[in-house]
């Protein structure tokens, strides 16, 4: 009995071939079987390609650091939004980018997804704020956009959690104004390889300028909060934190770092006698950089090595300041209320136990000398680390420093004066002794950092607009009145 007998499907097949001779039936059945095998192989190959595409998208999502902003801290669902991004204009809340059809991107086509990622415009036409680094993601290739789309649509768990609304003060609350900002500052050009550079350098450029969006933090910004392309990677501010110069300049940038040190820093966020990642950089290391492949990390180093050096006026590299100090041991047990003595007492009681009395640190806590935070020409990162602490988890190991400036910490909350005093003690003993901190500096960092011009001017924009509108209206009324008078006397 032929193998296709015994089922309604096989009977229909037998009926189909019943009108042909035995020889013809054999040939046709063979062709049918062959086509079935080809179809099965094609389906398996397509499935394999889809799996590879999703895996590629998963890697790209880590490289683009999507989880850092789109996952709320303290147990938030992955990619469900709700993370508060601190900006000079106010707190911008990230959105739900899970494939939830009710609250996420579940009904987005790939074209919708591409427009949101590259142009900062959602499916319903809402403009995103450039806290979402779409100005960098605009450089992503079509292939990488497809892979990211496949990953978010196929593998990310949908979470039916509404996105919280961002509430910025007027006029920043008018999202449609971002259309004008985009016309001025958003380029839709994809990143093109430089034929004069190596393949590794070009890969590093794509990672740094598009996926990792390094310039978003490490570049200065103009009056309208757009990146200053002419000084790219020469340093910027991220709320209360200072993002240092990472050009190849030997004094102000990373020109004095070895390749091995740069690789280690990108991979772990810590290099003894150099620097440690805190704030947004700690998030980048934890959620993104530590997950990159070794070839990609090496490509990043190659690219940074090849950037144009931009000096920031430093007389020596930040990590060359300071040396061990015996002051804490010599003053231990004394009492006093002068700023210098108060700084010593805060250091002795809150800092020396981890960073050691001589400031040398240990295997888990960094040295306070030969440290880019204490040797910088601005105090923001030193102050911010004291106020907000730091936390980063690399290879399953968490490096943690408590926040001494918040009520949520289990430590005693330090006042602005306490933080200023201990900062000055640390600077005088271990870092840039020429730098002085006053309580007003601490208050500014505690409140989120220096405000750019556009944020300072915001309260005056509405009254100014009313005045301008009133003047224009008066001019129109006056012009109409003059026209009528002329018509009456003509």
Image: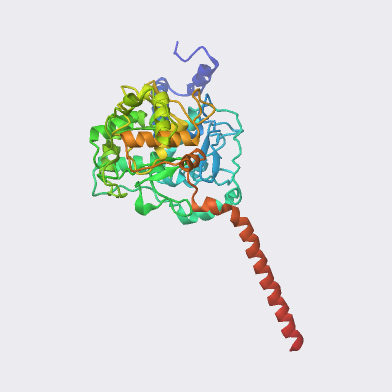
Tell me which corner region of the image, top left, top right, bottom left or bottom right, holds residue 396.
top left
Q: Is residue 431 above or below residue 14?
A: below
Residue that protrudes farthest toward the right in the picture: 488
Q: Is residue 357 above or below residue 172?
A: above
Residue that protrudes farthest toward the top in the picture: 1
Q: Residue at x 25, y 49 (%)?
A: 195
Q: Say whether residue 315 is visible.
A: yes
Q: Residue at x 31, y 34 (%)?
A: 430
Q: Is residue 384 left or right of residue 82?
A: left
Question: Where does the C terminus fall, quadrant-wise?
Answer: bottom right
In the image, 95 versus 362, the foreground residue is 362
The picture places residue 487, in percent across and down from the top left corner, at: 74, 84
Q: Say whether residue 150 is visible.
A: no
In the image, 276 versus 369, the foreground residue is 369
Q: Residue at x 65, y 68 (%)?
A: 471
Numbered marks: total: 0
The picture places residue 422, in percent across and down from the top left corner, at: 41, 33
Q: Is residue 436 above or below residue 288?
A: below
Residue that protrudes farthest toward the bottom in the picture: 490
Question: Where does the N terminus fall, quadrant-wise?
Answer: top left
Q: Residue at x 49, y 56 (%)?
A: 183
In the image, 354 versus 149, the foreground residue is 354
In the image, 180 versus 60, the foreground residue is 180
């Amino acid at each position: 009995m032929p193998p296709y007998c015994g089922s309604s499907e096989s009977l229909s097949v037998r009926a189909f071939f019943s009108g042909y001779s035995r020889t013809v039936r054999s040939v046709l059945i063979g062709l049918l079987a062959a086509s079935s095998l080809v179809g099965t192989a094609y389906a398996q190959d397509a499935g394999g390609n889809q799996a590879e595409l999703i895996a590629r998208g998963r890697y790209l999502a880590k490289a683009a650091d999507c989880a850092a902003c789109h996952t709320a801290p303290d147990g938030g669902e992955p990619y469900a939004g709700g993370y508060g991004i601190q900006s000079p204009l106010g707190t911008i809340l990230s959105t739900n980018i899970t494939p939830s059809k009710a609250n996420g991107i579940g009904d987005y086509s790939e074209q919708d997804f591409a427009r949101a990622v590259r142009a900062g415009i959602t499916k319903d036409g809402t403009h995103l704020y450039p806290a979402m680094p779409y100005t960098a993601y605009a450089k992503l290739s079509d292939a990488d956009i497809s892979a990211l789309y496949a990953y978010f649509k196929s593998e990310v768990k949908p979470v039916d959690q509404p996105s919280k609304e961002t509430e910025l003060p007027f006029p920043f609350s008018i999202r449609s104004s971002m259309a004008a900002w985009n016309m001025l500052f958003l380029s839709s050009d994809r990143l093109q390889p430089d034929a004069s550079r190596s393949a590794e350098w070009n890969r590093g450029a794509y990672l740094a300028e598009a996926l990792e969006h390094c310039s978003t933090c490490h570049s200065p910004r103009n009056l309208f909060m757009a990146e200053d392309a002419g000084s790219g990677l020469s340093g910027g501010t991220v709320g209360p934190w200072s993002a240092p110069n990472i050009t190849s300049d030997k004094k102000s940038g990373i020109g004095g770092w070895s390749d091995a040190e740069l690789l280690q820093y990108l991979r772990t966020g810590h290099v003894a006698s150099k620097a440690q990642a805190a704030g947004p950089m700690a998030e980048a290391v934890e959620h993104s950089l530590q997950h990159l492949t070794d070839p990609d990390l090496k490509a990043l180093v190659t690219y940074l090595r090849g950037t144009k050096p931009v000096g920031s006026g430093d007389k020596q590299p930040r990590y060359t300041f300071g040396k061990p100090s015996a002051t804490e041991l010599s003053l231990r047990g004394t009492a006093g209320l002068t700023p210098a003595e108060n700084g010593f007492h805060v250091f002795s009681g809150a800092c020396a136990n981890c960073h050691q009395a001589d400031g040398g640190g240990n295997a888990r806590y960094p040295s306070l000398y030969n440290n880019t935070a204490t040797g910088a020409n601005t105090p923001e990162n030193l102050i911010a680390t004291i106020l907000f602490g730091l936390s980063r988890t690399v290879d399953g190991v968490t490096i943690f420093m408590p926040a001494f400036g918040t009520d949520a910490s289990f430590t005693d909350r330090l006042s602005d004066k306490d933080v200023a005093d201990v900062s000055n003690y640390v600077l005088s003993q271990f870092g840039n002794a020429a730098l002085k901190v006053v309580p007003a500096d601490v208050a500014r960092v505690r409140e989120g950092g220096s405000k750019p011009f556009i944020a300072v001017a915001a309260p005056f924009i509405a009254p100014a607009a009313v005045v301008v509108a009133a003047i224009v209206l008066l001019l129109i009324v006056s012009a109409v009145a003059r026209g009528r008078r002329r018509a009456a006397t003509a």
